[in-house]
Every structure is written in C-alpha cells, then in structure tokens.
Image: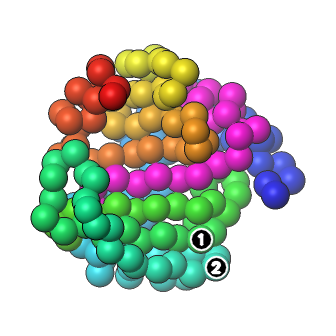
C-alpha cells in the first residue's frame, strides 16, 4: 500500500522543479553515480534502504551494451519523491548502468509531470513508456516505474525507444 501523501509529494516536487533551471540529473537520487562499482553502490546505500538491500547476479545479462557479467542491487525503501521506494541498481561489468525506481500506478500523472518539469518535452510517448532520451530518463507503464540510465547506454536505449521490440 502506498504511503499517504505520495501523490501530493510528487506533485509538490513537480511544482518546485518547474520554477528553476534544471540539470540533467534533476530527479536522480544522490546515491546514483554512473559508472560506480557494485561495492561503491553498496557503500552509498548504507543506511538509505529502510529495509536493507541485496546484491544478486543476473544471468543472462540483459543490459543493451552486452556486459559479460551483470549484478543487480535491490534496495527496499530508498527515499524518492517523498516516499520509500523499491529501487533496482543494475550493474554491468562492475559499472552502474541503469536504475529502476518503482512507484504506485496512482502516481503516474504526477510522475510524468515531474519528468516533464525536470526535463522538458519527452522525446517519445507510447502506451508503454514516456522517454526523455535527452536526459536518459523514462517512465515505464507496466510495472509503473522510473528509469534512469548511464551515458554508456544512451545510444542503445535511444535506438530501442525509436523501435521498441
């Protein structure tokens, strides 16, 4: 069940973001450092995952840059947009490449508005996703979640958004 006030918190963040010039990483939690090793991600997450985190192998790897080895650090309870969220840090060949942050389906409109306020007009809009490739961010419809990805994945992700299969 979603904590009370989640939609309000997202809406308030969207309003705050719209009133200032925004950087490429306007919505990124400060624990996200692209290229960080799994050990560095774990260190950054210490005390930030309300219910802990686990590091697990992903085999076969699914990242579009085809890493040899992939792991995922699942953080239960990372604070994001006013509520604790399930967050997945995807690490290929010991470099942080992708982060998924789950939200409630009811947060969709406020979440997309926060992305638009932070990053401007989306580059792609489909029933499956709303992408902001210029800022390496997206909203995924099912499951409802934010996606952020590294510069290393920018080209293959843009190609996928252009032609999702």
Q: Give the percent coordinates (x, y) of residue 117.
A: 55, 27
- Quadrant, the C terminus: top left
Region rendered in magenta: 95-119
Under tag 2, what secondary structure? loop
- Along the line of sight, which residue is nearer the eye, 44 or 77? 77
Label 1 sits on a secondary structure element that is strand
Mark 1 packing: few (<14 Cα in 10 Å), some, or many (20+)?
some
Q: Is residue 59 visible?
A: yes
Indicate the quadrant where residue 95 lies: bottom left
In the image, is 22 to the left or to the right of 105? Answer: left
Residue 123 percent across, percent down from the top left:
38, 18
Count all numbered tags in the image, as a single digit.
Answer: 2
Query: Which of these two is toward me, 127 or 53?
Result: 127
**Quarter-wise, where is residue 160 in the image?**
top left
Is the residue under label 1 in contact with that under label 2 (CB below 8 Å)? Answer: yes
Give the mark nearer the N terminus: 2 vs 1. Answer: 2
**Residue visible at 28% across and 67% down?**
59
Image x and y of residue 75, in percent: 52, 71
Q: Is residue 119 left or right of residue 39?
A: right
How crowded pointer 2 is (Cα within 10 Å; few <14, some 14-19, many 20+) is rated as few
The residue under label 1 is: 76
- Residue 99 forms part of the magenta stretch: yes
Please give the residue where the numbered disc 2 appears in the rendered image.
51
Say whether residue 131 is left or right of residue 6: left
Question: Which residue in the rendered view is the most extreme toward the right?
Answer: 4
Q: Relative to 145, say whether 123 is above or below.
A: above
Q: Residue at x 79, y 54 (%)?
A: 2
Q: Position of residue 147 (x, y in %)?
A: 44, 44
């Amino acid at each position: 069940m979603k904590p009370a006030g989640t939609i309000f918190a997202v809406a308030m963040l969207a309003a705050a973001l719209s009133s200032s010039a925004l950087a490429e990483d306007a919505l990124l939690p400060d624990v996200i450092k692209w290229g960080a090793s799994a050990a560095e991600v774990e260190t950054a997450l210490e005390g930030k995952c309300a219910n802990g985190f686990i590091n697990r192998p992903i085999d076969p790897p699914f990242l579009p840059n085809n890493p040899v080895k992939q792991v995922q650090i699942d953080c239960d309870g990372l604070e994001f947009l006013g509520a604790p969220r399930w967050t997945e840090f995807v690490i290929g060949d010991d470099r942080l490449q992708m982060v998924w942050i789950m939200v409630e389906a009811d947060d969709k409109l406020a979440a997309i508005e926060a992305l638009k306020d932070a990053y401007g007009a989306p580059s792609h809009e489909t029933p499956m996703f709303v992408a902001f490739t210029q800022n390496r961010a997206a909203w995924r419809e099912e499951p409802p979640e934010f996606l952020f990805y590294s510069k290393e994945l920018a080209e293959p992700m843009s190609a996928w958004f252009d032609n999702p299969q």
